[in-house]
Image (cartoon, rainbow, N blue to C red):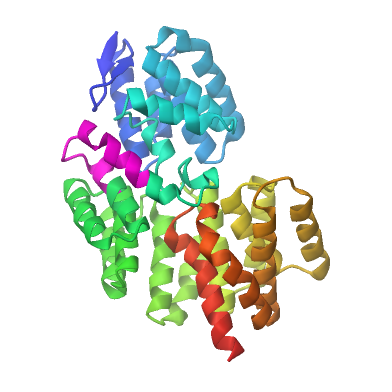
Amino acid sequence: MLQKDNYDLGITVDNADAYRYFIIGLDESLGLDSSGIESFIKSLSFEPDFALAYALLAKQLAIYGSPIKAKQYLDLALHHKHKSSLREQSAIDIISMLIEAKTSCLDAALEHIQDYPNDTIILPLIVGPFGLLAFSGSLYWRERNLKILKGVESSFFSDDWWFKTTQAFMFVENGEIKKASTYGQIAWDIKNTGNCAHTLTHIHYESSKYKEGRQFIKEWRLSSRDSSNMLHHIEWHNALLSLKLNKKDEIFPIFEKLISNKDGVAPLEYLADNVSLLWYCIIEDIIIPHTWNNEMHKYIDKYFPDIGFKFVDLHRSMLAATGSSEEREAYLKWIETENNNARSTLTELTRGFMAFFDGNYSDSIRYLEKIEPYNAIYGGSNVQRYIIDETNKIAHMQRV
């Protein structure tokens, strides 16, 4: 039986409860307060051959650090996909490419949204700071995000909170703060999701409304009762706002919570939040336990053992700068032997961080100033990459 999702796209499912939990899971995955994993599992308990539910469950498990389970459910999605519509089959294939890290995934996803521009299963994989475009190594992915969103805008209702907050986020990334503020507030007024809250924290930061941003986070935490999966990342934003307000004494308790809170946090987010805040503590001369540094070394080795994922490599370079001379040399040699188009850039970045850590500020500036114009290739948000610029600024201050 062909049901319809919230965007009038067909869903091949017979059981009403399977359909209901699938829609709940899809909404949860878009809102970011919950992974949607439990809802997809409930959906499948009512219809064990529901291919699209298997695929979305696999995707969410992959994001949240369960690759073995993700592969098992992906296999089931592929096994049952022949019962699905052409759109669903295409979505399943793209999710398969995503999980298997195939380079053809982005092109397939872009082709898919040409036919199904309001497919909120595939469009979120493309756009945003953690989307396929952001991690494609392109210098102009932010501009391309806006162009794509403009092209599909007519396919979404004006009161669609997900689309509005996604637009707002990409306006922020492209420096259009006024538009971002308008769209971000519209999205928040429609639905108070963790996704919308996250966009507003970026707007507060980029518009230098640091006190307002901290107050918003405080109120959001109370309203969400600390149950949102976005808690970890938004608390990271809280830490950055504290630094902007020169409240360094508040960083330690925030960091202590971040390092101990892994519940509901995707590994990529946990890594980026904690390693970057660790580096901020170093450049701001804030003392933190060395055990936290060791813990992040173990974490990156466990979840991201390979080089080549530029966003991870950015953070791995910060950690490498704190290592022994032997560990540093081994990492630099590893970079040089990798056959990827960003290795020279990554070498410069790593040497810039290492020079800063050693107090060789002139060398740090020399390396980092070469990187700064090209930092977009590492993906992630502007705020996440500002750490390169902040390191460079402090190096200039220390050199004087």
Q: Is residue 274 visible?
A: yes
Magenta-highlighted residues = 145-165
- Image location (x, y in percent) of residue 165: 27, 48
Q: Residue at x 67, y 64 (%)?
A: 348
Give yes or no for residue 149 being in the magenta stretch: yes
- The secondary structure that dominates the magenta segment is helix
Q: Residue at x 21, y 48 (%)?
A: 187
Give yes or no for residue 356 being in the magenta stretch: no
Q: Nearer the viewer, residue 104 or 81?
A: 104
* Quadrant where the N terminus is found in the figure: top left
Q: Nearer the viewer, residue 198 or 203?
A: 203
Q: Is residue 357 left or right of residue 277?
A: right
Q: Does residue 267 sit above or below 397 in this rendering?
A: above
Q: Is residue 257 visible?
A: no
Q: Which quadrant of the structure image shows residue 131?
A: top left
Number of numbered discs on residues: 0
- Image location (x, y in percent) of residue 324: 78, 69
Q: Which quadrant of the structure image shows residue 259?
A: bottom right
Q: Is residue 100 left or right of residue 50?
A: right
Q: Does residue 135 sit above or below 83 in this rendering?
A: below
* Quadrant where the C terminus is found in the figure: bottom right
Q: Does residue 65 sit above or below 90 in this rendering?
A: below
- Image location (x, y in percent) of residue 186: 18, 51
